[in-house]
Image (cartoon, rainbow, N blue to C red):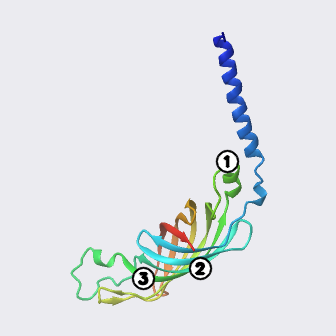
Amino acid sequence: MITKNALQIFYLILICTFFSTKISAQDSINTSSITVRSLNKFKLYLIGLGVEREQKITKSSTVYFGLAIESVVPFFPQSPPNSSDILRISHAINLAPIYYIGFKKYYNLQERAKTAKTTANNSGSFFGFEYDLIAPILINNLYTTHYVSSFSPIWGFQRNTLKHTNIEFMIGPSYQTDYNRHRISLLAKIGFNYLL
């Protein structure tokens, strides 16, 4: 008959053996081979859609460029002509074509690999810079905007959800100008990417 203490010692040895093999397996991961990939993306934002090319330039950084139709908060005059919208709710958000280019530096790929988290399809956190050119739009058949340039330092993350799908979030302050007026705004994007 096995004693109670012997059974406890056996379970303790079994658990220690299991965890020591897990720890040594994590230590043996070669994190020097972790690198970003070039990706073609079809993007579905919370409000909008677009296409993007993310091109690898170094082991942990990419440049990207794309075209999208996204929600924007445009510049508009102090009181739009023939308008009864005192709160300007109908002028607050509009869809506009946007051309953009940016840079991403992924900074935690090695740490994710060491903790056995996926780094597939550039799954990691990043910081960088984005330039957006917002094309002119007609607001409620009353007012046409000018081209607007937007300069934004960004922080965000990308997480792989399925084999050809990931989720992306980015946020940062944005300096916007139509070269007559200037403002500080917020750049925020969240959405799904289908990898082509």
SS assignment at label 1? loop
Q: Position of residue 89 (x, y in %)?
A: 29, 74
Quadrant (top left, top right, bottom left, bottom right) of the C terminus: bottom right
At 72% from the left and 64% from the top, the residue drawn is 35
- Mark 3 touches mark 2? (CB < 8 Å): no
Q: Nearer the viewer, mark 3 or mark 1?
A: 1
Q: Which mark is residue 96?
A: 3
Q: Nearer the viewer, mark 1 or mark 2?
A: 1
Compared with 176, 138 (above or below) is below
- Residue 88 seen from this side: no
Q: Which mark is residue 65?
A: 2
Residue type beneath disc 2: Phe
Mark 3 or mark 1, earlier in chain: 3
Q: Find residue 120 and report its image quarter.
A: bottom right
Q: Where is mark 1, residue-wise?
A: 115
At 60% from the left and 72% from the top, the residue drawn is 129
Q: Find residue 128 and report its image quarter.
A: bottom right
Distance of mark 3 from mark 1, alpha carbons? 41 Å
